[in-house]
Every structure is written in structure tokens, then in C-alpha cells.
Image (cartoon, rainbow, N blue to C red):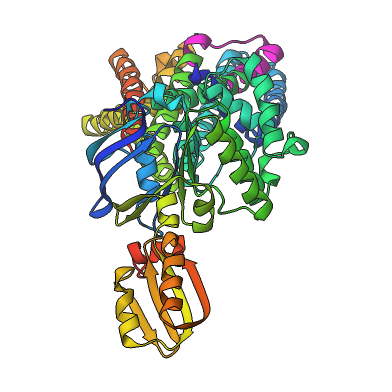
Amino acid sequence: MPASLAIDTHGLRKVFDDKVAVANLTLSVEQGEVFGFLGPNGAGKTTAVKMLLGLIRPSQGQATLLGAPIGDRRARARVGFLPEHFRFHDWLTAAEFLKLHADLYQMPPEISRRRIPELLELVGLTPHASKKLRQFSKGMLQRIGLAQALLNDPDLVILDEPTSGLDPVGRRLVRDIIRDLRQRGTTDFLNSHLLSEVEITCDRVAFIKFGEVLKVSALQTLVEGELSVEIRARHLSPEIVAGLSRWSQNVRLDGEHLNLTLPGEADIPALNRYLVENGVEVYSLHPQRISLEDLFLQIVGTDGGL
Amino acid sequence: MCIFTIARLTFREASRRWILWAALLMGILFLVIYSIGFNEIQKDAQRQAGSNPLMQFSEIYNFLTLAGLYSVNFLTVMMAVLTSVDTLSGEIASGTIHTLVSKPVRRWEIVMGKWLGFSVMLLLYLFLMGGGVLAVVYLLTGYLPPNPVQGMALMALNALLLLSVSLLGGSSLSTLANGVLVFGLYGVAFIGGWIEQFGALLNNPTAINIGIISSLILPSEALWKRAAYEMQSPLVAALGFSPFTSNYIPSTAMLVYAGLYLLTVIYLANRQFSRRDL
């Protein structure tokens, strides 16, 4: 196994009673990348994350986390985790909560004394350090949960739906933190169904449904890949339309409206020149990226995996 | 050591959620009522002593001390179960456990940390209450029952036993199911103890065996009966019957059994919690 893999799973499977939560998860995440784990609700994302962290015992399959078999305590010492529902001991204050988790990481007091105020500052909770978590809003709990996940300066951060409870300001904060982590070479594993977030932050994404990976792809190639072009033009003869087949197999003509998909935007000028040189009057040419949402629906389907 | 971190957390939770303070306040109230009541009765006894030269003060004091300790034993058992019944199952149900177990902590450290935290609390409670009863009697009359240390130690063992059973239940059942189970077991041991007591009085071997079997299911009443036996007055011992003891005394083998029972339950709680999906 290459040492550079932060997460490496082979045929991971989890069956609860007779319900298959994760069918067959084979996945590798390299160190230093921001990896998005996408899927509809109930696709097995949280179960998969819990297996990685040793919270749930897999029914079958193997996996390693930072090179160590899952469940290994030394590997967990280098991991930060924000659980999905961020329920914490709410009778603790924010500072006490971070101290508790610093102690669980067995952090020497002289380090935690410096680290805790730093993190409170990072997530914008310094004025609320001595407030009990019971009085925190959902967004504040998510922030303190995030601080907790970064306490040990982890090599791998696993965030389960990190922005679901946050307002736009909080989301920006999470994005900035992830960007900062990426710069420091920290691997981020992002469990999310908020596609716009993933689109902005991730290097690679895996689409998962029924506990199985349907597709893994670099977001760059997804975004830079296929695009659909909508053209409004006159004098489109059947011969000219047939000649478009050198760029696209997927051409649709509806009166003055021509729709086709291109493998990339590099083909647009040549397409335009072809049309103009053949006497077509082009009124508009409108290239559109296929959004992650379209792609998600295309790969995962519209039934939501239910 | 993460055990001590979890133990401190358990202690702090009991304090923050007013469990500790409620117990302390009610404990003080209990001791105040007990000392006033005891003082009234012993004054009355002193007054009547003039007309009845055969009156045995120490018998009265012993009876009242054991009545106090009987209540303390019951309260400590309640405390052991009520404080711990929700600690594992509640954290599992709410999800607060997730940030704990994903840390570089061994699962058994969480169980043993909680066990340690609750044990210290229970022992302090027992020391305050049981010690308080003994102190009240001693300060008012100068009387101390025989073997108070052994008696208190057996009561402490009883508290730890129920705490451990409650942690075992909490490692696999919901809070309510666990509570029903532990109190149910306690009820079986309790009624078994009474059947055994009457069986011994009437010399009925079947009734005695029912008592022994119920003690094997949960040796908690057996521990109390042995504690009461250790602390009873020599006269009651000679007569062979009081509301608190009988002439059928839980054997040393039963005490060893209770010790092994405790260790087994602690082991099973750790194993169960280590294996389960969270």
C-alpha cells in the first residue's frame, strides 16, 4: 500500500441486522487532498465515516487510516473528527469542552493552554469561551465542534456535514479553514450533500449510493469537462447540422435553437468559425457548464437512493 | 491517563447537573431528622430506665443504628443505580459519545473512567451517610456497634456491585430498559432475602434455597444481611432474629461469590461496550 494514502478501503461492508448500510466501499484518498464524499441521504456516508474512525465494526473488508489499520489508536491521535449531529456535553463551557478533548488527545497542558485560545479565536468564539454549550446556537456548536476537530493539529480531518447548520458567514469560515488546512498539507475528508460547498472546496469527489462508490473524479476535470452549448441561429441547413458531428454526437435542432454538448471549451471558436463560414447567422452562442448538481443527479439518479 | 479524564468528567457532570448537591442536601436533611428522632427516643428510654432496671440501652441503640444504616444502604443502592443508569446509554443515544470514542482513547478507559468517577462519589456518599448515622449515635450516647468498618465495607461493596450492574446494562440496553432491569434484579434479591429470613425462622429449607438462588442472581441483599450481621448486638445474635438479620447468615463463600460477581460484571461491561457499534 502506498504510504501516501490517508484513507484506503477495500470492499468495506456493513450490515445492520438485515439492512445493508454500506455495500462495498473501495476508496483511496491521498494525503493532502480535499476529498468530497457525496451521496443522497441514507447512502451510507455516515456509516462509512464511522467505520473509518473505529466507531462501527465493518462486517467485511479492510481499511487503513494514515497507514494504520482502522481502529488503531495512534492513527486516531492524528485525526480530527466533527460528527454529523455535533451533540456535545452541553454542561461544559466552550473552553472546558476544548480542554476535555485536549486531555483526551493527551496534549501536554502547556500546549493546550496556548492551543485552546488560538482555536477559539479561529472559529470566532473567543467572546463566548466561558459560556456553557447549552446556551450555544446550532451554528456556534458547529464552530466549537470544528475547533475540537482541529485541536491536535491533525494530519487528517474528517468532517461529517460540516456546514449543514451554518449561515453564510459560518460557511465562509469553514471554507477558509479548509483552504488553510489544504495549504498546510492536511487531508480533508468532507462528507456532504451541499454540492455548492463541495464544488468550491474539493479536489476530488466520490459519488456514493446504496453504500457503493459509483464514480470518483477530480473536480477539475468534472468542471472543465463536458459543457452544453445553446446556439440561436438562422439558415441552419441539415447538411450544416450533420457537419457538426465532428465535435459532438449529441446535437439537437429545434427551429432556430441548436443544442449540443462539447468535450471542452477549446472547441467553441472552431465551432463558431465553422457556422459563420457556412453562411449561418449566429445571434447567440451560450456555453453552459454542467453543474455538480446536474452531474450528481446524472450519476446518482433522481430517486434519491431511497 | 484517559481514565482519570473521564472520571473527572463524570464527577464534574454530577456536580454541574446538581446531582451531587441534591444528594448532599438530602443527605444532610436525613441526618438531621435521624439525629432529632434518635435523641428523642434515647431520652425517653433514659426516663423509663428508672422504673425498669432490666432495660438494655445498648440493644435499643443497636436497633436504631441498624435501622439508620438500613435506610442508608437502600439510599446508596438507589444512588448507585440512578446516577449511572443513563451514563453509557444516554451518551450513546444522544451522540455525545462520538467525539469521545473517536479520540485516541480505548473504549475500556471510558467505561472504567465512569466506573471510577461514580465509585468515588458513591463511597463519599456512603461515608457521609453511614458515617453520619454512626457519628450521631456515638456523639449522643457513646455507643458504637460491633465491627462498624467491616459493616460499612460490605455496604460499599454492595453499592459498587449495583453500579457495575447498571454500567453493564447501559453498555447494551436503553436507559429505561436498563433501569427496569437493574431495579428488577434488585427486587428479586430483596424479596429472596426476606423469604430466606422467614424460611430460616420456620426452618423451611425450600424457602432458604429460594433465598440463596436469588442471592446468586444478585448478591446485593446478601451483602446487606452480612453487614447487618457483623454489626448486630451480641444479644440479637444469641436470639437469632431481628428485622435486619436472621440466624441464616450469608456465608463467606457468598461474599467471595459477590466479589467475583462484581469483577465479572465489570469485565462484561467493558467487553460489551468495546464490541458494540456506536
Q: Does the magenta stretch include residue B138?
A: yes
Residue A258 quadrant: bottom left
Residue under the point 54% across and 33% down: B79
> Which region shows up in magenta?
B129-151
State whether the magenta stretch is mostly helix, strand or loop: helix
Q: In this image, A150 relative to B50: left or right? A: left
A9 to the left or right of A192 = left
Query: Residue lying furthest bottom in this view?
Result: A255
- From the viewer's perspective, is A280 left or right of B256? right
The quarter of the displayed image where residue A90 is located:
top right
Residue closest to the eye, A177 or B76:
A177
Q: In this view, does B151 lie to the left or right of B36?
A: left
Q: Nearer the viewer, residue A277 or A209?
A: A277
**Residue A123 screen position, x and y as percent:** 67, 39
Q: Where is residue B278 in the image (x, y as percent from the top left)?
A: 39, 40
Q: In this view, does A6 lie above or below A220?
A: above
Q: Position of residue B71 (x, y in %)?
A: 55, 30
Q: Where is residue B267 in the image (x, y as percent from the top left)?
A: 33, 23
Which residue is drawn at the image coordinates 46% and 63% (left, top)? A291
Which quadrant would residue A6 be assigned to in this image?
top left
Say if residue B66 shows up in the picture. Answer: no
Image quarter where the N terminus of chain A lies is top left
Q: Is A154 a magenta residue?
A: no
